[in-house]
Amino acid sequence: MRILLAEDERTLSDALVTILSHSGYSVDAVYDGQDALDWLSAGNYDCAVLDIMMPKLDGITVLKRIRAQGITLPVLLLTAKSETDDKVEGLDSGADDYMTKPFAAKELLARVRAMTRRQPELTDNLLRFGNIELSRGEHSLRGPGGSAVLANKEFQMLEMLMMNPERAISTERFLEKIWGYESEAEINVVWVNISGLRKKIAGVGGNVGIKAARGIGYLLSAGGKN
């Protein structure tokens, strides 16, 4: 799952990126409202965490503009303000939740989980295809031959594949969705993680495989080897 974090306090931003990344999320950080609007308008995120008080555009303005564009992803607002009017304005503008600084890391993670559970495509904790299942809570893959814990990027790639079975996903899409636009990751990191996933699917006795569609990308296919 990919999150956009818009927070202009660099120290806090770095801490939040670390917390979210260690919990299995892929995070892009920006530091002003205009960048937040531009990146969210690209439509490659599952959730956004927006500080209200930011340079160029404030978080509520960003929120109003993406909602006007029809972007419905969950949004959590952060602010140092605690007045009721600020909370009401944020929620009335389309925010899904609201947190006042300072806050505990566990609470932030709980609120992100709660927001994303409301998305229909992210409701199920277990994804199933063929005879394998992917646990979103444990980042583990299970099959008739056992189970395997997945690395963060492996988990996110398999999640994408299992949400789109029998449909090819391009290498570029994997890079954009998981590594982010400004990542220096190269195409071969996708191949390396695909290779690791193939071994783990085989290791748990999976009857599905990740196939390469020449010139298109990779797809999760039933009833066959990789």
Image (tube, helix red, strand yellow):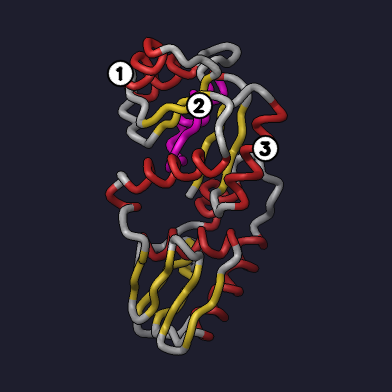
Quarter occupied by residue 74:
top left
User: Which callout, 3 or 1, points at the residue further toward the start of the chain?
Assistant: 3
- Identify the residue position indicated by label 1 in the image: 92
* Residue that mark 3 sits on: 15
Provide residue 131's location: percent of width, then percent of height: 35, 81
Identify the amino acid type marked 2.
Leu
Q: Which amino acid, mark 1? A: Asp
Q: Describe residue 14's horizontal placement relative to residue 54 as left or right.
A: right
Counting residues from the start of the chain, the first of labels 2 and 3 encountered is 3
Q: Is residue 132 left or right of residue 103?
A: left
- Taking the image as shown, residue 221 lies to the left or right of residue 27, namely left
In this rendering, the label closer to the viewer, 2 or 3: 3
Q: CA distance from mark 3 to mark 1?
A: 29 Å
Residue tagged by mark 2?
Answer: 50
- Report the residue at 61% width, 29% height from top: 30
Q: Is residue 101 magenta?
A: no
Considering the numbered disc 3 on the image, is that residue within a helix, a strand or a loop? helix
